[in-house]
Image: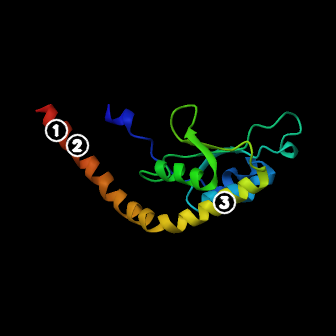
């Protein structure tokens, strides 16, 4: 049961591994979001020039809930600050934020990146603390799980 609840180990993807698959007009924006600690999974610029073969989706970005412990409230805060609409992704995890209909697309993407930069500066001490203590917590969980298994076997 515990294994089903726990999110899989998150290894941050190298930006160069996926940036070529991001809509051309928002590559710099997505790169900045990732550099500011808001790990992206997928996105859509919402601009016709990036989707000449179809109507584009409404602009959105999906943020990876495994970026660091307890990051989901930070993702919702980012959306609120940038005047985007936050929600859980359709699969009920990760955070999906999309542009408000009344906002010009280019301005909205710029505002999202600026908000991510500002929030990154505020969150930096917390993220450093979490990253330095998470290995200790993982070691404790492993010890706790092995102790529990030992006690059950008796």
Which residue lies under the disc numbered 2? 146
Asked which quadrant contains residue 120, the reply is bottom right
Label 3 or label 2, whichever lies nearer to me, is 3
Give the percent coordinates (x, y) of residue 38.
57, 55
In the shown orientation, is residue 82 left or right of residue 133?
right
Is residue 116 something that shows in the picture? yes
Q: What number is the disc on residue 150?
A: 1
From the top left corner, tell me how far across and down residue 92 is, in percent: 51, 33
Residue 35 shows in this picture? no
Where does the C terminus fall, quadrant-wise?
A: top left
Q: CA distance from mark 3 to mark 2?
A: 43 Å
Q: Residue at x 20, y 37 (%)?
A: 149
The answer to whether 49 appears left or right of 37 in the picture is right
Which mark, residue 113? 3
Question: Picture coordinates of residue 133 (x, y %)?
Answer: 34, 61
Eyeballing the image, is 46 above or below 113? above
Report if the CB atoms under discs 2 and 1 are less than 8 Å apart.
yes
Q: Which numbered disc, 3 or 1, marks the residue that appears first in the sequence?
A: 3
């Amino acid at each position: 049961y515990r294994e089903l609840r726990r999110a899989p180990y998150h290894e941050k993807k190298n930006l160069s591994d996926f940036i070529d698959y991001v809509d051309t007009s928002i590559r710099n924006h997505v790169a900045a979001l990732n550099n500011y600690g808001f790990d992206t999974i997928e996105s859509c610029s919402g601009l016709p020039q990036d989707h000449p073969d179809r109507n584009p989706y409404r602009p959105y970005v999906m943020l990876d809930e495994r970026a660091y412990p307890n990051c989901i409230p930070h993702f919702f805060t980012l959306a609120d600050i940038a005047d985007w609409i936050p929600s859980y992704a359709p699969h009920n995890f990760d955070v999906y934020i999309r542009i408000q209909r009344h906002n010009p697309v280019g301005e909205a993407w710029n505002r999202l990146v600026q908000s991510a930069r500002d929030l990154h500066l505020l969150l930096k001490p917390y993220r450093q603390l979490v990253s330095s203590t998470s290995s200790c917590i993982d070691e404790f969980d492993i010890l706790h799980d092995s102790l529990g298994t030992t006690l059950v076997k008796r």
